[in-house]
Amino acid sequence: MKIRHSIIALLAVVFAGGVQAQDSKPADSTPKLATGLLMKQGDKLVFAPCRDRSYAMVDDISPGRALTAALDSVGLAAGKKLYVELFAVVDGGMVRASGLNVARSEGRCQQPGGNVESWRATGNEPGWLLAVGPEVVVLKRLGLPDVNVPGTTPTAENGAARFNAHTEATRLAARFEPGVCHDTMADAVFGWTATVEVNGQTLKGCAWQR
């Protein structure tokens, strides 16, 4: 049987964790992470998966089209090509997107965290960066020594993710909550807010899954 070359072949869209199409099983309606480049052509959103030559139309099914509003805030409506990580389901050849992990105006694909990182968070004034992995959690702050504590896997709690880790000298805790978060200095928008506490200091910023 010949396979028709049509947009339905977009089941090859790259999803984090991998999704395999099987005729014997019903379609999986659980949103998965789709990574790629997104452009606006007229009133349509065109998605090109990373490491793939195909493309798809995106249907924003988020409440009140909040996803499109977030993407417009980093230049989608102005014609910029965005790198996006969307929580979405492939339905009849359409990528139905319901949520956002991260979107940047860089317009090029990013490397996933793999087995090294599960989350990353960042903030400004002062600048800081948190990388969460199973082996080590690293906090970098502008003008201060790096903080390293044992690795951990954040636990889910009412839609949020949180963790606590410590050494004899350092106590570090973080909470990532769903919600649109803007980093104007990086021209990026994220799907999570971040609160990090380290030895009594509280840092606020944005977070995204890796």
Image (spheres, rainbow, N blue to C red):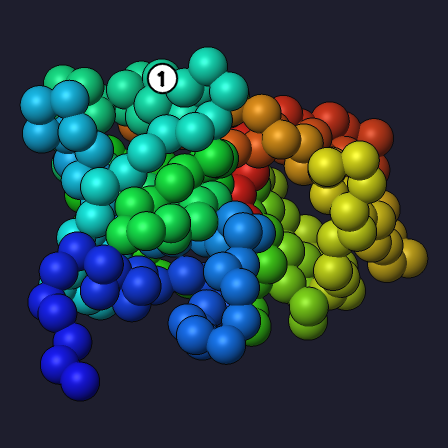
Location of residue 109 in the rendering, given as x and y in whole percent from the top left corner? 25, 54
Mark 1 is on which residue type? Ala
The N terminus lies in quadrant = bottom left
**Above-or-below relation of 59 to 146:** above
Q: Is residue 42 left or right of residue 178?
A: left
**Above-or-below relation of 156 to 45:** below
Where, by quadrant of the figure, is residue 2 drawn? Answer: bottom left
Location of residue 157 in the rendering, given as x and y in whole percent from the top left corner? 81, 41
Residue located 27% across and 52% down the image: 93
Q: Residue furthest front?
A: 1
Q: Is residue 110 left or right of residue 182?
A: left
Residue located 68% across and 71% down the image: 135
Q: Residue furthest bottom?
A: 1
Residue located 52% across and 43% down the image: 208
**SS for dot 1:** helix
Location of residue 57 in the rendering, given as x and y in whole percent from the top left corner? 22, 41
> Camera-side residue: 8 or 190?
8
Residue 67 seen in the current view: yes
Location of residue 116 in the rendering, given as x and y in whole percent from the top left corner? 55, 69
> Camera-side residue: 189 or 88?
88
Q: Which residue is mark 1?
A: 69
